[in-house]
Amino acid sequence: MNIKHLLLATASVTVTAAPLAAQTEIEFWHAFTGRLGELVAAQVEDFNASQSDYTVTASHKGNYSETLNAGIAAFRAGEQPDILMVFEVGTATMMAAEGAINPVHEVMSNADFDPDAFIGSVKGYYTTGDGQMLSMPFNSSTPVLWVNRDALTEAGIDPDTDMSTWENVGAVLDQLKEAGHQCPMTTAWQSWIHLENLSAYHNVPFATQDNGFAGLDTELVLNGETQVAHIKAMGEWAQDGKFIYAGRRNEGGANFRAGECALFTESSAGYAGITAEATFDFDVRPLPYWSSLVDAPQNTIIGGASLWVMGGQTDEEYAGVAAFLNYLSSPEVQAQWHQDTGYLPITSAAADLTREQGFYEASPGTDVAVKQMTTNAPTENSKGLRLGNFDQIRTIIDEELEAVWSGDKEAQAALDSAVERGNDLLRRFEQANR
């Protein structure tokens, strides 16, 4: 065959070949950067490579607050993504956004999806009163105590010393200060750890109406004896230079990872960054409790975010969303996510697989968060928070706590003010969503 005939034959084949079916694009907006952003990108790449019907496109939209606001603005403009990551304090806002979401239990109704496979203390945060899942847990974490063992040793303190109680932590802070340590303790997410989780861990309410789960007519009660005692102690530590406040989000994480701070209260998901950056020997310990207030701790509550399916999409897009959520919740993917990040394994199967793979034995302390969440069945005080305008309420709490740390306010006065100001926002939310 000469070159002319070859070209004609090739052209004939090109013309008659059946066109490839177009893949359905699924837009996924999230709030992750750094190592967590890399791990999400790897999940998306793996899912896309595993099948040929859908292409997930992941986009970073800023921090948690910025991502939520971007999703709301996009919906109003008719340009919403298929999947939106929303941090846990935005749950009530999303539930009230009528027409903006398509509940996960409806999206997954025709998929091989078992909501009962999810760990109860995680699932309960994102379900209705009758157990219908509204959004899918994704990155669920809980606070723990991170310990720089080298810093303790250098200060002449046994790095294995018991710090299960705040009383014991206080004694260690005294020793660190006496040894000249410049940052005995710092924290991330002060409201989440030192008021929201403190309340649950000591089985006292943060708000009425089962912390908002039982109705919109809820009021803050975060100014009780337990909360005031804890914030008073931390305020005294701040004035003595034993607690160093670094910022409202996770600014203190950089200080701890750099080896500057000895103790650090942060999310269990600090694991990804700490293991990647720390050049010192560290431990992860349970969040301390006040033995003077309770005989034993109850359970901590989750932070992080869940994935909400946005309304107004095509049937093909919803099918793709269901496939992607099934992939993300599979035992293998969840176990790897848990092991890489320190986020909780959101399903029992993922936790079991992680244990079978020997991860907890090889990495002591990485099961602390799981135990904190699952040892005791949650009570009405410890199953989580569902409050309207909660992001704005946290800003108020931050302002009041900062006044305590600086010595400008007493703990009781600051928390009383946070309750009064926060309740105004709760009433506005209630009126807007009757």
Image (cartoon, rainbow, N blue to C red):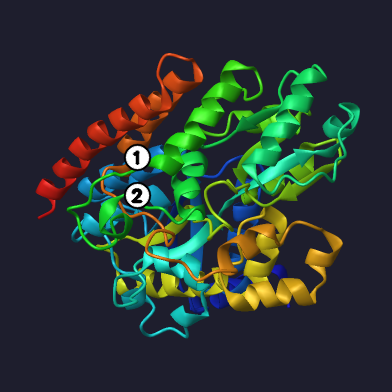
Q: Residue 90 — which label?
A: 2
Quadrant of the rendering where the N terminus is positioned? bottom right
Decide: marks 1, 2 in contact (CB < 8 A)? yes
Q: In the visual, does 380 lie left or right of 378?
A: left
Pointer 1 residue: 391
Q: In the picture shown, does residue 119 fall above or below 232?
A: below
Position of 202 compared to 103: left or right?
right
Task: Identify which residue is drawn at 64% across, 69% down.
Answer: 333
Residue 425, given in percent of the width and then of the height, sits at 21, 38
Specify which label sits upstream in the sequence, 1 or 2. Answer: 2
- Which one is nearer the viewer's eye here, 74 or 96? 96
Residue 117 visible in the picture:
yes
| Kind of residue at badge 2 | Gly
Give the farthest residue toward the front.
292
Q: Quadrant of residue 257?
A: top right
Q: Residue at x 63, y 41 (%)?
A: 166
